[in-house]
Image (spheres, helix red, strand yellow):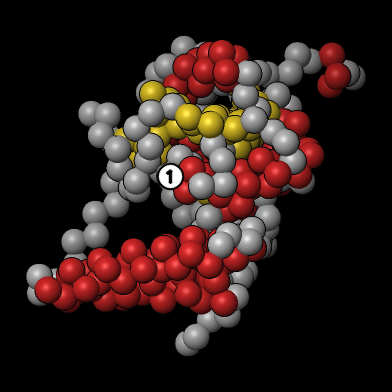
Amino acid sequence: MTDSNAIPRPTMSLVMATLGRTDQIVRLFDSLARQTLTDFEVIVVDQNEDDRLVPIVESDWAFPVRRVHTPGERGASRARNCGWRISRGEILLFPDDDCWYPADFLERALAVMQEQGCDLLSGRPTDESGRTINGRFETTALPIDRITAWTTAIEWIVFFRRTILEAIDGFDDDIGIGAVTPWQSSEIQDIIIRAINAGFSCWYDPTVVGHHEEIVLGRPDARVLQKARGYARGMGFVLRLHEYSISMQGKWVVRPLAGSVVSIARGRWRMAAYYGQVALGRVEGVLRRTLS
């Protein structure tokens, strides 16, 4: 019998929660196969009811892959917690199932963590040209604090030392996409704020970049409006949970309201509805209740 303690631990563990996707996972794995840092494992927490991912997971990848099948569970935070607790790496990353990374991504991140001596490192989401996408992000490297946590972090480009996750017990299962609660986002801000409160060093470097399909709103339909409101609820909830000032909470509510007014002035009625749903969702999160 092999002594599992005698098997060298990988430097990194990549824990991917997934539900419903296949082709995008192959794209992610292809990008991982090209990494210049190769000392990592991948853990797939598969919430699908079927075995659609078995052929992908069992393909001949250049890195070890483990699949944990949890068909009765939902929620990205719950899946991430399941995965990191059985992982073996000293540094954890939680890729989205539809992101992908440049070849030097892992090596670059490890170098920055060593240089800064930080416990947590966050990077910047871009398209393949290097243009920032899917949110506002700081343009210079800086320490992450309670304020900058909102402009420096997205779930799939945050590296954690294992000690953080062990100390604060990982993600909150009840916050984030797919959770059983109405609070459908901002799990990364919640965990970063808890890490800061526990005394861990958190750093942001915009030169550490990963890729994702850009979210282009265009003419948002009912599904997009519903999703936007759920995400906004999560943000409002986390702002209230961590006792941000009334003025800070108000700023994040007023901003989409201003967007709605501008959209109305330009005759962009669907975008006005979108920004209105974002504002309403943030109010619901702050109040810790849904209004309809």
Q: Residue at x 45, y 73 (%)?
A: 281
Which residue in the rendered view is the most extreme toward the bottom? 292
Which residue in the rendered view is the most extreme toward the left? 266
Q: Is residue 32 above or below residue 258?
A: above
Residue 271 placement (x, y as % from top left): 22, 69
Q: Is residue 171 above or below residue 284?
A: above
Most foreground residue, 197 or 32: 197
Judged left or right of residue 108, residue 219 is: left
Judged left or right of residue 133, residue 88 is: right
Would residue 68 be visible to someone looking at this image? no
Quarter occupied by residue 261: bottom left
Quarter occupied by residue 250: bottom left
Disc 1 crowd rating (10 Å Cα; few below 14, some 14-19, many 20+) is some
Most foreground residue, 265 or 80: 265
Residue 175 placement (x, y as % from top left): 61, 60
Q: Which residue is mark 1?
A: 151
Q: Residue at x 78, y 38 (%)?
A: 166
Q: How many marks?
A: 1
